[in-house]
Image: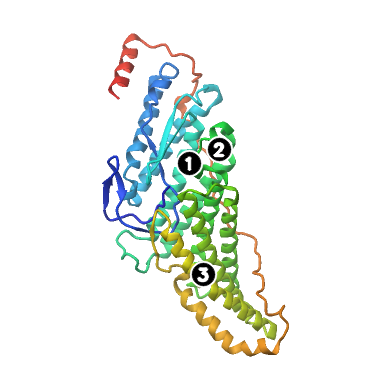
Amino acid sequence: MGCGASIPKKCKVGGKGKKRRSVIQEVAVFVPTIRIPVDSDVAHPLRGLVSKELVDRLSKFRDRVVALSEDIYCADVSDVSELQHALEEYLPVVLGLTMKESRLESSVEFRWRTLDDDQECCLSSAWYEVLSVIHMMAMLELFEANLILIPKNGQVGGERKVSEDAKKDVVDSLLRASGCLDYCVHRILVQIPAQVKKSFPSYFQEGMLEAISIQALAQCVEIQLGLASECEKATLSVKRRLACELVSYFSQAHYCLSGCDTSDSFGKKLLLFLKWKCMEAKAVAYYYHGLVLDKGNEASSHISAVCCLSAADDLVADSKRACLSFCLVNPITRVPPPWGIMRNMHKKIPDAACKRFQMYGYLFEQDNNSALQSLPDLPEFALSLRPEGYELPSTDSIWDNVDSQPQIQSLKEHLDDEDEVETK
């Protein structure tokens, strides 16, 4: 289980000599878990079935990903980009193992582990390896987005000062992450036999992958809403629409988990994050909906506006408690300062609710129609964002004409292979 948050200024060594985070982190973009590849014996199972050049290429690219992955929690944006590039180089080569004509899909056992708790999952499936690579690419996009929003040298717990251009870069990263995960659900999981899926870790459940994909879209809208709140030209109707979309995205993500096993710390943390963010989104949506209704001239409009603003005030208080619950579940994370759209809402919403009740409280005494005094439904809007399209790269040309027939080796080449295995 992992929760990729801002990168620590110091990392300490712990357990099996691996890098560990030594400080309590802060979360802007939630990164559910980061899994990294572990050294696996690629050469021995493939020896004699494919050329030595192909085996060396596959081993070289995977070893590079393994080496770059170990220090990811101590990385900066450029390090993350380097690791992404290494994954992109490795993927076309490993894809060759999935080709039906190669008949090598289950020939190699691939090992991966989560960074925080060292839990390993080893499966003899090339499609599992491809799934793991693309999942890691998505997690790194989320991880990089969080790095940008919580600058490494920023004051801990202080106000986040991020440029508009940087926020747009974050939106691009989130859309790419959503696209990778959406592809995993609809194009890769269907390639993997049910018997293999039974051995998957919990974070590879279909509903879990869908939830994180939609969560990434939700956080795109969250940033867009924050930018709109700072723009004088953005109307109340535009802000309300974005806030209502935000509610829909977080609600959909939460619903995706309804059929998933969320009993482990990973599932619990994700559930609490979505619950917290959904409460915040509803608070903002009811706030803007109340302000729009308040522009009406009828007494019923003012009554509905007061109901919306009162609900928003209650939701802000509930969201603070939900945030604390999220932060206290392992891995423990720092309570973040309000940022984006919520930066001013913790004051604006209670003030607006109090002011409108003082202005229109008498209408509740004059009007005995309980239906008018109930909380109105939020308007529904068509969702504007979709995951960015992702497609697998073409298989590396080194696989051309490979048919997994036994390769004829010279005695010297065979002895060289034996020496390499013995030295590993």
| Disc number for residue 254 | none
Amino acid type for the residue under numbered disc 2: Ile
Amino acid type for the residue under numbered disc 3: Asp
Is there any visible trace of residue 235 in the rendered image?
A: no
Neighbour tally class for label 1: few under 14, some 14-19, many 20 plus, Cα within 10 Å: many
Is there any visible trace of residue 175 in the rendered image?
A: yes
Task: Tell me the quadrant of the picture where the C terminus can be found.
Answer: top left
Residue labelled with disc 1: 134
Amino acid type for the residue under numbered disc 1: Ile
Q: Position of residue 372 (x, y in %)?
A: 70, 79
Residue labelled with disc 3: 318
Q: Position of residue 33 (x, y in %)?
A: 43, 48
Q: Position of residue 304 (x, y in %)?
A: 65, 79
- Dividing the picture into quadrants, the one containing residue 422 is top left
- What secondary structure is marked by label 2? helix
Q: Give the label, 2 or 3, closer to the camera.
A: 3
Q: Nearer the viewer, residue 304 or 325?
A: 325
Residue occupying the far top of the picture: 411
Coloring scheme of the render?
Answer: rainbow
- Dividing the picture into quadrants, the one containing residue 159 is bottom left
Residue at image location 51% in from the left, 79% down from the top: 350
In this rendering, would 133 be left or right of 363? left
Residue at image location 58% in from the left, 77% down from the top: 309
Label 1 or label 2, whichever comes before in sequence order: 1
Placement of 333 over or under 197, stated as above or below: below
Residue labelled with disc 2: 188
Circles 3 and 1: CB distance less than 8 Å?
A: no
Q: CA distance from mark 3 to mark 1?
A: 36 Å
Circles 1 and 2: CB distance less than 8 Å?
A: yes
Neighbour tally class for label 2: few under 14, some 14-19, many 20 plus, Cα within 10 Å: some
Residue occupying the far front of the picture: 263
Placement of 19 over or under 276, stated as above or below: above
